[in-house]
Amino acid sequence: MAYAISDACIKCGACEAECPVSAITEGEATYVIDADACISCGSCEAACPVGAPAEA
Ligand code: SF4
Ligand code: SF4
């Protein structure tokens, strides 16, 4: 299963640099994860200050 970013995202950008496969990009309301690219490593969840990324 891939990770997904919830509406709790405050767009701080911290997760983007932590993703080993560059699956995270800035979206309109939140940062977004490309589910096809995500390898479910959990680095974005660890980097996020508000707990927005979670396994979907
Ligand atoms: Fe990237 Fe890992 Fe987060 Fe998936 S779980 S988006 S691979 S940092
Ligand atoms: Fe959003 Fe969390 Fe990523 Fe910051 S680290 S951009 S709050 S998902």
Image: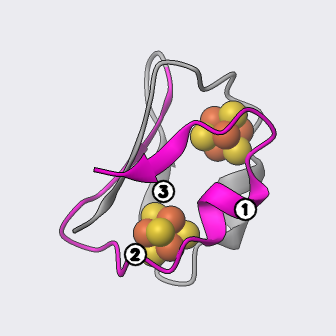
Location of mark 1 (residue): 46
Q: Is residue 29 left or right of residue 11?
A: left
Figure check: 23 above or below 48: below
- Ligand 1 within 8 angstroms of badge 2 C-beta: yes
Asked if residue 22 can be seen in this view, the reply is: no
Query: Magenta region: which residues?
Result: 30-56
- Ligand 1 within 8 angstroms of badge 3 C-beta: yes
- The amino acid type, in three-letter code, at marker 1 is Ala
| Percent coordinates x, y for residue 53 in the rendering | 52, 46
- Secondary structure beneath label 2: loop
| Percent coordinates x, y for residue 1 in the rendering | 22, 68
Whether residues under marks 3 and 1 lie with C-beta atoms below 8 angstroms apart, the answer is no
Identify the residue at horizontal 58%, vertical 20% (top origin): 8
Figure check: 17 above or below 5: below
The total of numbered circles placed on residues is 3
Mark whose residue sits in front, 2 or 3 = 2
| Percent coordinates x, y for residue 9 in the rendering | 60, 26
- In three-dimensional space, the C-alpha distance between marks 3 and 1, rounded to whole angstroms, equals 14 Å
Q: Nearer the viewer, residue 25 or 47?
A: 47
Location of mark 3 (residue): 24
Location of mark 2 (residue): 40
- The amino acid type, in three-letter code, at marker 2 is Ser
Identify the residue at horizontal 55%, vertical 71% (top origin): 42
Q: Is residue 2 left or right of residue 29?
A: left
Q: Residues within 10 Å of mark 1 (few under 14, many from 20)?
A: some
Dividing the picture into quadrants, the one containing residue 40 is: bottom left
| Percent coordinates x, y for residue 26 in the rendering | 52, 38
